[in-house]
Image (cartoon, grey):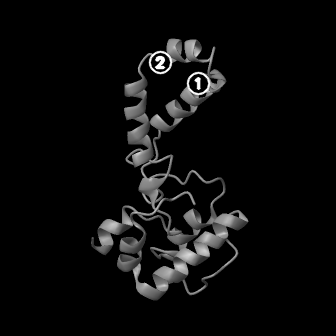
Amino acid sequence: MDYKDILNILAPCGLNCQKCCFNSNGDIRRFSVSLQNLLNSFDRYARRFSNFLPVFYQYPSFKELLSYFARADCKGCRKGTCKYPNCGVFKCYKQKGVSFCFQCDEFPCDRTNLDPDLKRRWLQMNKRMKRIGVEAYFEETKDLPRYK
């Protein structure tokens, strides 16, 4: 895959937008819609099953979350709006005129506004892209889960 195509998939922070639970073209949305279709009118069965399998009492909550995933509407950080509250990367990469944070002469910085875990991942992803290149990084990570 070439650099231009990768820019449509990887966010400026390095995360794969297509693997995000908010992405309208991602697997999570697609599989959620498919699961909704497969479950169809499962509500009455869940109520019946809850008589001998208590976990099915939680089906309404599961169904609500599944519905949320199925309604994902983000086109990706480069095409829409970042769903991470107060993301500093989203604002900064445009101002700096870079595609990824590691390309900025101020990388690494403290303007990400990411929580400690996500900031650690951001730093790892960008250092890796800087070392091996964006295309190689994408190939290396494209089949890995986003949520680790």
Residue 49 placement, left or right of 1 = right
Residue visible at 58% across and 67% down in the picture? 89
Asked which secondary structure carries label 2, the reply is loop
Answer whether labels 2 and 1 touch (C-beta < 8 Å): yes
Measuring 66% from the left and 57% from the top, which residue is drawn there?
A: 86
Res. 28 image quadrant: top left
Residue highlighted by disc 2: 42
Mark seen at residue 19: none
Q: Which mark is on residue 59?
A: 1
**Residue at horizontal 37%, vertical 33%?**
34
Instruction: Answer left or right for 67 relative to 120.
Output: left
- Nearer-N-terminus badge (2/1): 2
On screen, 18 above or below 113?
above
Mark 2 Cα shell of 10 Å, populated few (<14), some (14-19), many (≥20): few
Above or below 136: residue 20: above
Residue 125 seen in the current view: yes
Q: Residues within 10 Å of mark 1 (few under 14, many from 20)?
A: some
Residue 86 appears left or right of 64: right
Question: Is residue 71 visible in this depiction of the protein?
Answer: no
- Considering every residue shown, the one lying at the far left of the view is 1
Position of residue 132 measured from the top left corner of the image (x, y, whole percent): 42, 85
| Secondary-structure class at tag 1 | helix
Q: Is residue 59 left or right of residue 100?
A: right
Quick one: 2 or 121, which is closer to the camera?
121
Q: Amino acid at mark 1?
A: Tyr
Q: Amino acid under label 2?
A: Phe
Query: Where is residue 57, by image quadrant?
Result: top right
Name above or below for residue 56 compared with residue 111.
above
